[in-house]
Image (spheres, rainbow, N blue to C red):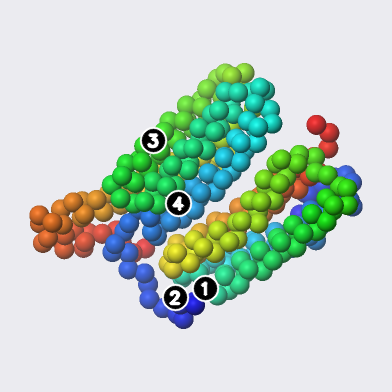
Amino acid sequence: MTEASATTSAAGDLPVDGVLAAVPIALSLLVAGWALVATLRHRAPDRAQFAGLAVLEAALLVLTVLTLIALGGGQRPDEPGSFFGYLATLVCLPPLAWVLARMEPTRWGSAIVCTICLVTPVVLVRLQQTWTVLGG
Amino acid sequence: MADPQPAERPQPVDRTRTNSGPGRLLIAVYLLFAIAATSRAGLQIATRFEAAPMAYLLSAFAAAVYIVAAVGLGRAGRTGRLIALACCTVELVGVVGVGAVSQARPEWFPDETVWSGFGSGYGYIPLVLPVLGLLWLWRTRHDLDLAVTSRPRPSRVESDQSFGPPAT
């Protein structure tokens, strides 16, 4: 699903694509689903949510590092300003969820984790678009 | 560090405060929108301000409102509530007004803003967010009454607390 929606052309050259993007998106949705269940069950953020956020952050950092390597190799995003804005935002989202969830040890903490984990895939897809949009 | 069994006790929400519980979720969403609108407006103004100055200034204004609203909700005192109330009102007027104008006079907004098309570019969340904010401020309005009336009439406080919002 993510691969299909990611790009139409020149997909092979893009660092923010394929498995690299699909894994964080899937992870994020998984954590969001789990957090939603916790919210509906009136549960505070549990270890699984924090662990999920940590793994998600790790996956995003891997994506960031590989992207920077690709940049070092001469590839360039089509909209550099937006690209780095989205990249910086993306990497900050799981820590933001972590901090806010720590501050709010109630069901609403789980709701915060769920919300931010739903936003993360959107930002990631927008990140892909700023890299892959051709022309302009 | 984790609470060993945070799920065991249902959270007693007897002390509903603007910046806790659902309010914290609201603050989180406001923070996200503050980040999104600020970076978007900053980028637009920095790279192509001449293309649509009005739209970009509006984006910057919206970004500022989101930031101030998040701060206001986070402070939770009388001042914070007033700030949040003002921001939510401005947002609601802004999103409805800009949405209507961008439909009627699209040429005034050659580029998208956060509030164009009633916030359709952001899943209509800009339209829903101020409404939720105002509802939340209304729901927690007795916080302030408690703080104000606690000194002259302490007994009143006890009865008021039993009327607190249900711990849903």
Left-right relation of B138 to B62: left
Q: Confirm whether circles 2 and 1 share one chain.
A: no
Kindly report the distance in space between the C-alpha atoms of the residues bearing marks 2 and 3.
36 Å
Q: Confirm whether circles 1 and 3 share one chain.
A: no
* Local crowd size for mark 1, using a 10 Å CA cut-off: few (<14), some (14–19), many (≥20): many
Q: Which residue is mark 3?
A: B89
Which element is circle 2 on?
Answer: loop
Circle 2 or circle 3, nearest the eye:
3
Q: Chain of mark 4?
A: B
Q: Which residue is mark 2?
A: B7
- Residue at x 75%, y 63% (from the top left corner): A62
Query: Which numbered disc, 4 or 3, marks the residue that appears first in the sequence?
Result: 4
Which element is circle 1 on?
Answer: loop
Kindly report the distance in space between the C-alpha atoms of the residues bearing marks 4 and 3.
15 Å
Kindly report the distance in space between the C-alpha atoms of the residues bearing marks 1 and 3.
36 Å
Kindly report the distance in space between the C-alpha atoms of the residues bearing marks 2 and 1.
8 Å
Q: Chain of mark 2?
A: B
Residue A114 shows up from this direction: no
Kindly report the distance in space between the C-alpha atoms of the residues bearing marks 1 and 4.
21 Å
Left-right relation of A81 to A70: left
Q: Assess whether mark 1 and mark 2 are in contact (beta carbons under 8 angstroms).
A: yes
Q: Nearer the viewer, residue B127 or A79?
A: A79
Q: Which residue is mark 4?
A: B26
Query: Which numbered disc, 4 or 2, marks the residue that appears first in the sequence?
Result: 2
Which element is circle 4 on?
Answer: helix
Rendering coords of residue A127 (x, y %)? 72, 47
Left-right relation of A21 to A109: right
Q: Which mark is residue A46?
A: 1
